[in-house]
Image (tube, coloured by chain):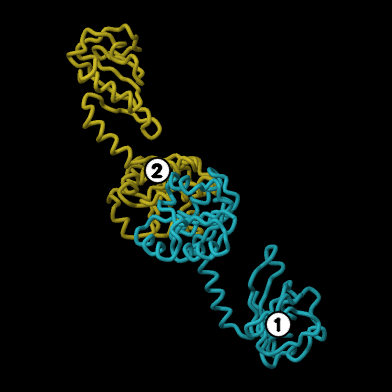
Chain colours: A yellow, B cyan
Amino acid sequence: MNVIIVGCGRVGAELALLLSRRAHDVTVIDHVGSSFGHLDPAYRGRTIEAEPLAEGVLEKAGIRETQALAAVTNSDAVNAVVAHVARSVYDVPNVVARNYDPRWLVLHEAMGLTSVSSTAWGAQRIEELLERPRLRAVFSAGNGEVELYELQVPEAWVGRTLGALVGGIACSPVSLTHGGRATLPEPGRVLGAGDIVHVTATLEGAGDLGRRLEGTEA
Amino acid sequence: MEILIAGGGRTGATLALTLHAQKHEVRLLEHRPSVLAHIHRELPTELIYEGNPNDPRTLEFARIADAQVLVASMSSDAENLSLCFIAREHFKVPRTIATINDPRFAWLFGPRFHVDVAVNQADILAGLIEQELSVGDMMTLLKLRKGSYSLVSETLVADARAVGQTLREVEFPRNAVVCAILRRNDVVIPRGDVRFEAGDEVLALVDEASAQQLAALFGPPAPATARL
């Protein structure tokens, strides 16, 4: 796959390395030449020092033959414009924009861009670890509005039902693993020691579930 | 008219003041504290809306959906582009005008970002300066219909063929019309009895072929070169 990465800060350089290790054909563009210093010596792709939005630069980077583009500069406006140009002018099939300032996320959404908010996502992860140590997020849908969590049944919940644990809150059980064997969960299922439960939940649902697990709420 | 201006820098603030004086309903959006301090001294407070123009809540607070015109005059071209896009897509603003800071980005300012009018500041300034430097030389002010017709300006040199003749006497090329004569600080309406003087700046609408012939009438008697 040919991939163009616009912006060679920490995110851009890390992404370039990941893709280059998977043997993709990567081109990184940044208007500041010294930014390429962020790239790992193991990176095996092209670099172009140029203003990405100046006429002809994306074409020089091969945008007409590219299958994917990531706009990951630290300017939300530049990311939005690059992503929109890639999509609407050059028909790049897969375009992802990085969201830097969470207040811009609404604008990225209004422009119909697929965006990843590393700032909002990182803060949310840390908050979860601080507030709900028993719940581990293993997958985020969208920009984290709904997440898939893994939890190990605590001592206090052994012998009670799954329905009692997840009933009445914004939370759906996905699977129950007992002795290394996963099954589809039934609400009447009695929880055993060492069982692992996967649930999807909103932030609010995860908060409620966290409090139940801690025993701070019946 | 209700006009929302995003960006209170030199251009935005001057425009807000001018439009306010013409009784338009102007709202100026700005968030940088240093700029706000400055514009609060120059503009009536009720025109100034504090907030980041990139934040949709600020746009709603400044009632963007009621504006007939949005002027994006921020110092970031990417911000001007995305704001025009959002203004049309999201808030249905009927007309958008954006300033171009860096001419290298000019190619993006157009329908794909819902920019109805793009004002290229560097181009305009360069054009004005070039015009000042070009006495006796033809200047293209505006190209119409993809360049087949142009509005040109030419300053008459003292020994030009047309000097001393009235408009009626000069044999103009078929596809050329004189639109105005700028004489000293006045604008002279071009009627048949107006006599050309050295130093007159003539604005004319011409096609490519007539531009050459016009240059021969107004320029120096030696073969003149038209720059179109």
Residue closest to the eye, A91 or B85: B85
What secondary structure is marked by label 2? loop
Mark 2 highlights which residue? A24
Taking B191 as reference, is A188 above or below it?
A: above
What secondary structure is marked by label 1? helix
The quadrant the C terminus of chain B occupies is: bottom right
Mark 1 highlights which residue? B215
Give the image location of residue A98, x and y in percent: 39, 44
Taking A109 as reference, is B214 above or below it?
A: below
Residue A3 falls in which quadrant of the image? Answer: top left
Which chain's residue wears label 1? B
Q: Is residue B121 left or right of residue B39?
A: right
**Count of marks, rendered view:** 2
The quadrant the N terminus of chain B occupies is: bottom right
Which chain's residue wears label 2? A
Taking A102 as reference, is B53 above or below it?
A: below
Closer to us: mark 2 or mark 1?
1
Residue sitting at 24 percent across and 8 percent down? A160
Q: Amino acid at mark 2?
A: His
Give the image location of residue A30, x and y in percent: 38, 56
Residue closest to the eye, A132 or A152: A132
Residue closest to the eye, B118 or B222: B118
Residue sitting at 57 percent across and 81 percent down? B132
Tag 2 and tag 1 share a subunit: no
- Disc 1 crowd rating (10 Å Cα; few below 14, some 14-19, many 20+) is many
Give the image location of residue A108, x and y in percent: 45, 43
